[in-house]
Image (cartoon, grey):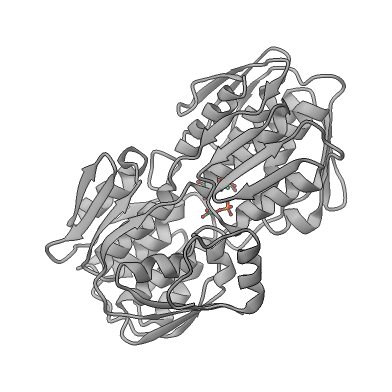
């Protein structure tokens, strides 16, 4: 079992480079299934466990995938099967994103049910509603979902009851090869949706309006592979911005796109954090004590739920009391108990957490219950008194490339104690361009 050990108290300074976005690359890899001719070349694909899993899903369908030095080459000329196994889907919910592309290209897809996860039940009703509106028959079996269509999918007008990121992506991908025009209303507006639409358009799709609440897709007969560079990860960037602020440090977060981070920048500035925007990234530093603010998560362009736990860590060291309201997922306060183990004062009332500032955080043995909870625990540990031990590191590996190493390069006292299996898997795909100094 791997763990991350952090000795708190160091101010961070220097530059940290942001990798490509996990939540952009996953649907982009899934979309590559649509390319019946040519090769897709995806640059800045971050070396993350989730990326390895979705690549394996494609390989299990008979698609050729080569992943080297953060570039993925996908050749989807022939597809042998339309079934994605439970073994892979259970490892990562986003595997379900292959359903739209398979259905559109092959007329059939059978995927294991992704199920819930630590942060909520996460239904897929909106994805299925979209496929049905486009003429697919959906069968829900014991632990799997099968979708079939006779001939091509048909364009349709689809109103999403919730502006779901995954449903918008899945339906948008399915609609690219449908007969006629599809209009998605109340579509999600996240930057990752825009990145996916750009990639699909480069493959030959006709998509307009991505990034707004109404997306229009004119179906085409065929798509081919395309070359694409993935956008930088706004959540990874936001996490390092908070690492700078919480330690009273000064970091240049290289590659961060300010326009993708408006709600995070605004809230941090409201707290008194200094943020200078530059075309190459963001400089984040503090000159005075921070004050508490209230934060409410919302779909983009609201405050991202994927930054909620990290923001809560920052509120722990600010002056005053802050309210954190989670409106996107019903169970995303699992980190609270772990913060409390580190001597934080937080009370949860339904979907709101009341966070007392000026906490005297103390090191403890804590567990990452999900990806962002894990990141938030590392942030709190950076300022806690003593040596914090964080387990559940596999969650963190889903979304952060070598976080311990990156933080150590900017002055954190942090070490990852890896088990041999994790190291072997990482070496297999060439995860470390540079070996961490502590390895
Ligand atoms: C791989 C990826 O991109 N993951 C992101 C994506 O997840 P994901 O795409 O799964 O999140 P959604 O936007 O779909 O979920 C938002 C809300 O809608 C609900 N819902 C969703 C689909 C559906 O059919 N029915 C339904 O009720 C969910 O339960 C949740 O309460 O967006 C989330 C919200 O920004 C982020 O936290 C995740 O990091
Ligand atoms: C919840 C997240 O991801 P996923 O949807 O892949 O579980 C996340 O990135 O914080």
Quadrant of res 344: bottom left
Q: Position of residue 231 (x, y in %)?
A: 45, 40
State the count of labels: 0
Residue 108 against residue 142 in the figure, above or below: above
Q: Is residue 382 left or right of residue 25?
A: left
Residue 323 against residue 364 in the figure, above or below: above
Q: Residue at x 73, y 51 (%)?
A: 56
Q: Is residue 274 left or right of residue 31?
A: left
Quadrant of res 64: top right
Q: Residue at x 73, y 58 (%)?
A: 90
Which residue of the protein is positioned furthest toward the top in this rendering?
180
Residue 354 is at least partly visible in this image: no
Q: Is residue 51 left or right of residue 21?
A: right
335 or 72, which is in the foreground?
Answer: 72
Q: Position of residue 190 (x, y in %)?
A: 47, 37
Q: Position of residue 257 (x, y in %)?
A: 34, 42
Tell me the quarter of the image containing the N terminus: bottom right
83 or 139, which is in the foreground?
Answer: 83
Q: Residue at x 87, y 52 (%)?
A: 142
Residue 205 is at least partly visible in this image: yes
341 or 283, which is in the foreground?
Answer: 283
Q: Residue at x 84, y 39 (%)?
A: 82
Q: Is residue 304 left or right of residue 290?
A: right
75 or 129, which is in the foreground?
Answer: 75
Q: Position of residue 8 (x, y in %)?
A: 32, 80
């Amino acid at each position: 079992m791997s763990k991350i050990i952090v000795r708190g108290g160091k101010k961070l300074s220097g530059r940290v480079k942001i990798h490509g976005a996990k939540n952009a690359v996953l649907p982009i890899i899934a979309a590559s299934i649509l390319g019946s001719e040519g090769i897709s070349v995806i640059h800045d694909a971050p070396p993350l466990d989730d990326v390895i899993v979705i690549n394996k899903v494609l390989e299990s369908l008979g698609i050729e995938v080569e992943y080297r030095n953060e570039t993925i080459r996908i050749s989807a000329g022939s597809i042998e099967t339309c079934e994605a196994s439970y073994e892979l889907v259970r490892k990562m919910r986003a595997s379900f994103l292959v359903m739209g592309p398979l259905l559109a290209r092959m007329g059939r897809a059978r995927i294991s049910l992704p199920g819930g996860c630590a942060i909520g039940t996460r239904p897929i009703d909106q994805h299925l509603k979209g496929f049905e509106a486009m003429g697919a028959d959906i069968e829900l079996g014991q632990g799997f979902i099968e979708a079939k269509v006779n001939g091509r999918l048909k364009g349709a007008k689809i109103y999403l009851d919730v502006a779901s990121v995954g449903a918008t992506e899945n339906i948008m991908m399915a609609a690219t090869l449908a007969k006629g025009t599809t209009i998605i209303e109340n579509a999600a507006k996240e930057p990752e949706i825009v990145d996916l639409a750009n990639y699909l358009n480069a493959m030959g799709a006709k998509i307009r309006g991505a990034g707004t609440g109404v997306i229009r897709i004119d179906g085409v007969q065929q798509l081919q592979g395309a070359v694409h560079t993935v956008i930088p990860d706004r959540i990874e960037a936001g996490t390092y911005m908070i690492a700078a602020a919480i330690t009273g440090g000064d970091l240049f977060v290289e590659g961060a796109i300010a326009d993708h981070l408006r709600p995070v920048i605004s809230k941090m500035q409201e707290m008194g954090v200094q943020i200078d925007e530059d075309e190459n990234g963001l400089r984040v530093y503090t000159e005075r004590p921070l004050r508490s603010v209230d934060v409410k998560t919302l779909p983009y362009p609201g405050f991202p739920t994927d930054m909620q736990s990290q923001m809560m860590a920052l509120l722990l060291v600010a002056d005053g009391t802050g309210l954190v309201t989670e409106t996107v997922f019903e169970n995303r306060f699992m980190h609270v108990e772990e913060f409390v183990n580190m001597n934080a004062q937080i009370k949860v009332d339904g979907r709101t957490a009341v966070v007392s500032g000026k906490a005297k955080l103390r090191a403890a043995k804590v567990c990452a219950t999900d990806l962002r909870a894990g990141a938030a625990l590392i942030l709190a540990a950076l300022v806690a008194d003593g040596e914090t031990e964080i387990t559940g590191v596999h969650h963190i590996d889903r979304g952060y490339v070598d976080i311990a190493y990156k933080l150590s390069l900017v002055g954190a006292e942090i070490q990852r104690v890896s088990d041999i299996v994790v190291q072997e898997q990482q070496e297999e795909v060439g995860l470390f361009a540079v070996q961490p100094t502590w390895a």
